[in-house]
């Protein structure tokens, strides 16, 4: 009976293997061709069964490749190969590979099942093929930040399912296509919520058809192009619009009417030639938080009424406004600099509002400022690891006080929970270098959990989570992410030579350690009383400007006095496991649950700062079975403590008995 069951199990298992393991020969050939033509593909692309052996970045359904995600992997190629013949592909994301300098071929039309095409931040060139309009299942099309040229294909209007259209940051030219039945145009895109066409060379007038009342646009970005003429009044048809960008064009006539847009919160029409003399009535819309009309030709009297929202920001710099009826008692943030009303020593607070100060950024983490090894950075959770870094660009934000940390913590927490809910091994995220220009941008450090580096598929998925906007984030508009090539994919450097060198160096370090211990023991006697605790550790930093003082540590972290106090139950007698001329050794449990041995130097045995630092650096580099490894140190409140891994047998005593230090 048992044998029968076993046999049955074996047969079923083999059947499962056979069914799941065979990749369609055509798809296999396509991937193998990529493997020989593209550089920097994942090293696990081995064998003859991408679907069965789970090649990184590839997912299959019924032996056919349905997902190809190689975002941020440093792929290098001038040719996208035969990807268009992966005919069951649904999801293609090659974003953040600046070395993909290819054209998008007409044959892309073969990907009939494609729902998502993300090529953000590569170097695609040439025209966007007209055939893209046959990808009827497309929901998300992100071609921004490439070098596409030529017109926007009108056929994009055939993409009935499209929700997101981003063609910004390219060199597209010509008019914005509208339909001319039977020829399609962008006004046919009834389900699309985002039109991002910024930063191209689009020209001509904006056609009234573009603003069809059946459209569902929430974000409309036409800024930084060469559009001319008046903005059609049909714009007011877009009742769900929340953000509107028309800045940096040559638009003229009246400032467009937006009354009826009850969700609008961010409007930028700066640097055009709008000349309506009254301030537009839509300033009273309760949803509005930011209105930028700087560098136009708006003249006459400004009357803001009193129905504007109290946290409204209005920028009217560089216009022709001569009078302001409520020069006192208004409470919006108003800037009228560079208008006639602010000339000749005018003192209104609206005249000197100026640009907001650059924000300070986030408060830094509360870890000790230790220095991590090469390619490693201290995470907000005080762990050295290799973060994935890059810049997140926000199209807009609804707040003016960039120093309010709520906005940073919200962003950070939202990203972390988005990563975690997509099963990504992210430990923490830090945000720095806020900059405001065309975009609000922050530098992101995304730290791995578990291992101290990310795998390729994790890096890829992180890019996808941000670029695909898989989270909902208050206070900010949509964003995109451009990375800095990831330093530290596993399997990049380790080699047999590395191991041999490692062993040799390890042996050398042990000899060095013993030698230095002897030297130190002699030295310590002389130095004992001179120890000065203030310098130079007070300035241990982890940025390069401080490289001179920061100890070079490997896997060793700083511990606070309080933490070690907690760990040892206030250094209670019961926790003492050894003592000697140098001081006492305590057994303790860190907040993390880690059991450790803490060697606390007593007064009189304190070392000089430089010696202590050298010792920590030396100990932190040793990982050898006969030497307990140093997991941390404490250097504050007049204390010098070393925290070792706790080993319960006798070897602990040998190692801590003071022979070394
Ligand atoms: C492939 O599928 C697995 C399981 O459904 C999923 O966890 C993983 O994220 C997918 N990989 C890609 C690259 O989409
Ligand atoms: C792919 O498209 C074909 C039609 O072209 C359709 O029959 C099939 O169901 C689609 N497959 C998936 C997985 O959506
Ligand atoms: C595309 O739209 C059609 C109907 O318009 C619908 O049946 C199909 O499921 C949609 N595809 C996607 C990927 O949303
Ligand atoms: C991508 O966007 C960034 C930020 O706007 C810009 O500095 C860079 O030049 C862009 N690259 C391309 C190829 O458009
Ligand atoms: C909007 O949709 C309705 C119903 O589908 C249709 O009758 C109307 O013609 C459409 N309007 C425009 C401007 O296309
Ligand atoms: C607006 O610009 C268009 C095109 O540049 C021009 O023909 C028209 O005369 C301008 N209108 C006004 C009122 O300046
Ligand atoms: C104003 O817009 C034009 C494009 O119409 C652009 O060339 C120029 O740099 C912009 N000026 C400012 C100050 O942004
Ligand atoms: C002021 O606006 C005009 C267009 O109205 C523009 O040409 C000029 O460059 C702007 N000046 C500044 C300082 O932005
Ligand atoms: C200013 O804003 C506050 C709310 O912050 C509001 O109560 C007050 O009425 C406003 N003042 C005026 C003059 O609108
Ligand atoms: C910071 O912003 C939040 C959210 O808008 C707000 O609730 C909070 O009061 C602000 N804090 C300060 C100090 O302005």
Image (cartoon, grey):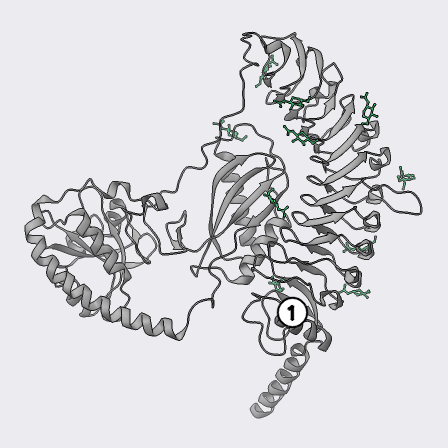
Mark 1 crowd level (few <14, some 14–19, many ≥20, 10 Å Cα) = some
Which residue corresponds to the image point at 78% horizontal and 56% vertical from the top-left?
137
- Is 210 placed left or right of 264 in the picture? right
Q: Position of residue 343 (x, y in %)?
A: 59, 10
Q: Secondary structure at mark 1?
A: helix
Q: Position of residue 282 (x, y in %)?
A: 73, 21
Quarter of the render that holds ligand 9? top right
Q: Nearer the viewer, residue 70 or 646?
A: 70
Q: Is residue 66 above or below residue 261?
A: below
- Is 132 placed left or right of 415 in the picture? right
- Is 134 placed left or right of 511 in the picture? right
Q: Position of residue 470 (x, y in %)?
A: 62, 49
Circle count: 1
| Residue 387 shows in the view | yes
Q: Ligand 1: does it lie within 8 Å of the C-beta at label 1? A: no
Q: Is residue 372 above or below residue 506?
A: above
Kindly indicate the quadrant of the structure image that contains residue 294.
top right
| Residue 581 shows in the view | no
Which residue corresponds to the image point at 65% horizontal and 78% vertical from the top-left?
21
Which image quarter is the N terminus in? bottom right
Q: Which residue is outermost to the left?
A: 526
Q: Which residue is mark 1?
A: 34
Which image quarter is the C terminus in? bottom left
């Amino acid at each position: 009976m048992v044998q029968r069951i076993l046999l049955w199990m074996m047969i079923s298992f083999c059947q499962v293997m056979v069914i799941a393991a065979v990749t369609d020969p055509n798809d296999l050939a396509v991937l193998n061709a990529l493997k020989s033509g593209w550089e920097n593909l994942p090293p696990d692309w081995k064998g003859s069964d991408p679907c069965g052996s789970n090649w990184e970045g590839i997912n299959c359904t019924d032996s056919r490749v349905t997902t190809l995600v190689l975002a941020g992997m440093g792929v290098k190629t001038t040719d996208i190969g035969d990807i268009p013949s992966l005919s069951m592909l649904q999801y293609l994301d090659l974003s953040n590979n600046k070395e993909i300098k290819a054209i998008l071929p007409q044959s892309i039309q073969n990907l009939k099942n494609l729902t998502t095409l993300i090529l953000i931040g590569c170097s695609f060139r040439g025209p966007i093929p007209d055939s893209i309009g046959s990808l009827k299942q497309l929901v998300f099309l992100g071609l921004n930040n490439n070098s596409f040229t030529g017109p926007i294909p009108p056929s994009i209007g055939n993409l009935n399912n499209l929700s997101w259209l981003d063609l910004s940051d390219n060199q597209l030219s010509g008019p914005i296509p509208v339909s001319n039945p039977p020829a399609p145009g962008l006004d046919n895109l009834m389900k699309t919520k985002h039109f991002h066409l910024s930063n191209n060379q689009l020209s001509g007038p904006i056609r009234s058809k573009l603003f069809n009342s059946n459209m569902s646009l929430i974000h409309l970005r036409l800024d930084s192009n060469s559009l001319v003429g008046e903005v059609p009044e049909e714009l007011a048809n877009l009742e769900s619009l929340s953000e509107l960008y028309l800045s940096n064009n040559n638009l003229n006539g009246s400032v467009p009417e937006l009354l009826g847009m009850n969700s609008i919160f961010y409007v930028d029409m700066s640097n055009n030639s709008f000349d309506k003399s009254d301030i537009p009535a839509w300033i009273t819309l309760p949803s509005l938080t930011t209105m930028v009309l700087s560098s136009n030709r708006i003249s006459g009297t400004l009357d803001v009424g009193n129905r504007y929202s109290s946290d409204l920001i209005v920028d009217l710099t560089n216009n022709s406004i001569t009078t302001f009826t409520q020069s006192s008692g208004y409470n919006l943030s108003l800037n009228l600099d560079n208008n006639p009303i602010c000339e000749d020593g005018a003192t209104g607070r609206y005249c000197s509002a100026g640009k907001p100060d650059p924000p300070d950024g986030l408060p830094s983490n509360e870890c000790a400022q230790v220095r991590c090894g090469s390619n490693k950075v201290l995470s907000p959770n005080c762990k050295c690891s290799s973060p994935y870094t890059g810049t997140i660009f926000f199209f807009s934000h609804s707040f003016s006080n960039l120093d309010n940390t709520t906005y940073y913590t919200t962003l950070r927490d939202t990203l972390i929970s988005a990563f975690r809910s997509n099963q990504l091994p992210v430990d923490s995220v830090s945000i720095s270098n806020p900059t405001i220009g065309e975009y609000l941008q922050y530098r992101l450090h995304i730290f791995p959990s578990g291992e101290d580096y990310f795998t390729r598929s994790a890096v890829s998925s992180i890019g996808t989570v941000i670029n695909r906007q898989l989270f909902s984030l208050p206070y900010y508009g949509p964003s995109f992410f451009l990375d800095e090539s990831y330093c530290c994919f596993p399997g990049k450097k380790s080699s047999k030579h590395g191991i041999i060198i490692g062993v040799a160096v390890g042996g050398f370090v042990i000899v060095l350690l013993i030698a230095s211990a002897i030297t130190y023991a002699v030295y310590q006697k002389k130095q004992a009383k001179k120890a000065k605790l203030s310098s130079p550790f007070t300035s241990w930093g982890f940025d390069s400007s401080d490289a001179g003082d920061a100890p070079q540590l490997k896997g060793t972290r700083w511990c606070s006095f309080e933490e070690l106090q907690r760990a040892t139950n206030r250094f209670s007698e019961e926790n003492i496991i050894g003592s000697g001329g140098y001081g006492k050794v305590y057994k303790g449990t860190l907040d993390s649950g880690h059991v450790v041995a803490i060697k606390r130097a007593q007064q009189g045995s304190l070392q000089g700062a430089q010696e202590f630092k050298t010792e920590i650096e030396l100990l932190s580099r040793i990982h050898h079975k006969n030497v307990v490894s140093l997991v941390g140190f404490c250097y504050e409140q007049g204390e010098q403590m070393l925290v070792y891994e706790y080993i319960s047998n006798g070897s602990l005593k040998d190692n801590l008995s003071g022979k070394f230090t």
